[in-house]
């Protein structure tokens, strides 16, 4: 049976890390609006051109762009078994648009889970974050090193990338954007009675088991 869920939390909370693990366990697809936007920027599309400066400054891209992107993506075959929304919705209008989009498509949300963390720790997590440029596996300078230094555990590649916006100044802007515009959606789902919280400060494996306990 298909399962659709949202992982909520500020930059660095572990949404990407945990989504990748849940993808493997439940055969569902991670839909990261950040990844989609970075692909648009890389391709040089009109949308990418509009988004680039906003992302570099740590602001939010317009709701219309994001909602259109997600709506198309959810229709694709790899979402039939279900999806994990990572980085979307990020504003109350996006959450409302998601509700009407899902009901139009006769889909529903099974879980909304917030990873609760503290801000200062997020600065350290974001500034130490890097990714395998070949397979996308995520790492951290201190908290998630590859078994063999400089070699990706998953695919053996020796090339890694760091995001342009993963610096202290931008992270602070992203954290403010989160508190001002995204945190209110926790109440939105809380009021609907489908919000659950998981301690995102725990070790990566502990967070994964807490999520699996909720999902079943
Ligand atoms: P998000 O997608 O929410 O922005 P990530 O999953 O990319 O966050 O995690 C940010 C960084 O912190 C990554 O480098 C990751 O390896 C690391 N990380 C993720 N979860 C934890 C955790 N529970 N404890 C310590 N470091 C973590
Ligand atoms: P994080 O690691 O902070 O969770 P993401 O990869 O989710 O970062 O997002 C990177 C950037 O892309 C954000 O700072 C924002 O500019 C833009 N972005 C991603 N998702 C959304 C969204 N749902 N609404 C508006 N802007 C978004
Ligand atoms: Zn790799």
Image (spheres, rainbow, N blue to C red):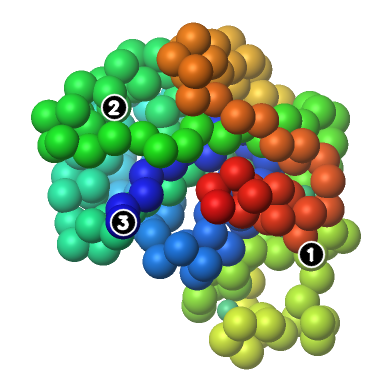
Asked if the residue under mark 2 is in contact with the one under mark 1, i.e. CB atoms within 8 Å, the reply is no
First-in-chain label (3 vs 2) = 3
Asked if the residue under mark 3 is in contact with the one under mark 1, i.e. CB atoms within 8 Å, the reply is no
Residue at image coords 46%, 63%: 26
Disc 2 target residue? 98
> Quick one: 95 or 109, which is closer to the camera?
109
Residue at image coords 40%, 66%: 27
Instruction: Pick out the residue farthest to the bottom.
Output: 156
Can you say whether 77 is above or below 171 in the image? below
Quadrant, the N terminus: bottom left
Disc 1 target residue? 144
In the rendering, which numbered label is found on residue 120?
none
212 on left or right of 56: right
Q: Inspect this view and state whether residue 1 appears.
A: yes
> Quick one: 30 or 38, which is closer to the camera?
30
Q: Tell me the SS state at disc 1.
A: loop
Q: Is mark 2 within 8 Å of ligand 2?
A: no
In the rendering, which numbered label is found on residue 1?
3
Q: Is mark 1 within 8 Å of ligand 1?
A: yes
- How many numbered circles are shown? 3
Asked if the residue under mark 2 is in contact with the one under mark 3, i.e. CB atoms within 8 Å, the reply is no
Residue at image coords 59%, 21%: 178
51 on left or right of 19: left
Residue at image coords 84%, 59%: 143
Q: Nearer the viewer, mark 3 or mark 2?
A: 3
34 on left or right of 132: left
Q: Inspect this view and state whether residue 55 appears.
A: no
Q: Nearer the viewer, mark 1 or mark 2?
A: 2
Q: Tell me the SS state at disc 2.
A: helix
């Amino acid at each position: 049976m298909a399962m659709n869920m949202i992982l909520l939390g500020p930059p660095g909370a572990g949404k990407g890390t945990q989504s990748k693990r849940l993808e493997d366990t439940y055969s569902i697809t991670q839909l990261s609006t950040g990844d989609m936007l970075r692909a648009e920027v890389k391709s040089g599309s009109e949308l990418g051109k509009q988004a680039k400066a906003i992302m570099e400054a740590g602001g939010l891209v317009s709701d219309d762009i994001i909602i259109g992107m997600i709506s198309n993506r959810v229709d694709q075959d790899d979402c039939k078994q279900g999806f994990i929304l990572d980085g979307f919705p990020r504003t109350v209008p996006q959450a409302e648009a998601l509700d009407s989009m899902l009901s139009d498509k006769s889909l529903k949300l099974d879980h909304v889970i917030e990873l609760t963390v503290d801000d200062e720790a997020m600065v350290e997590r974001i500034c130490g974050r890097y990714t395998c440029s070949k397979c996308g596996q995520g790492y951290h300078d201190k908290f998630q090193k590859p078994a063999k230094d400089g070699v990706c555990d998953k695919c053996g590649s020796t090339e890694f990338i760091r995001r342009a916006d993963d610096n202290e100044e931008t992270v602070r802007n992203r954290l403010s954007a989160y508190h001002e515009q995204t945190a209110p959606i926790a109440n939105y789902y809380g009021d609907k009675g489908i919000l659950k919280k998981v301690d995102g400060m725990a070790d990566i494996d502990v967070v994964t088991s807490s999520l699996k306990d909720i999902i079943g």
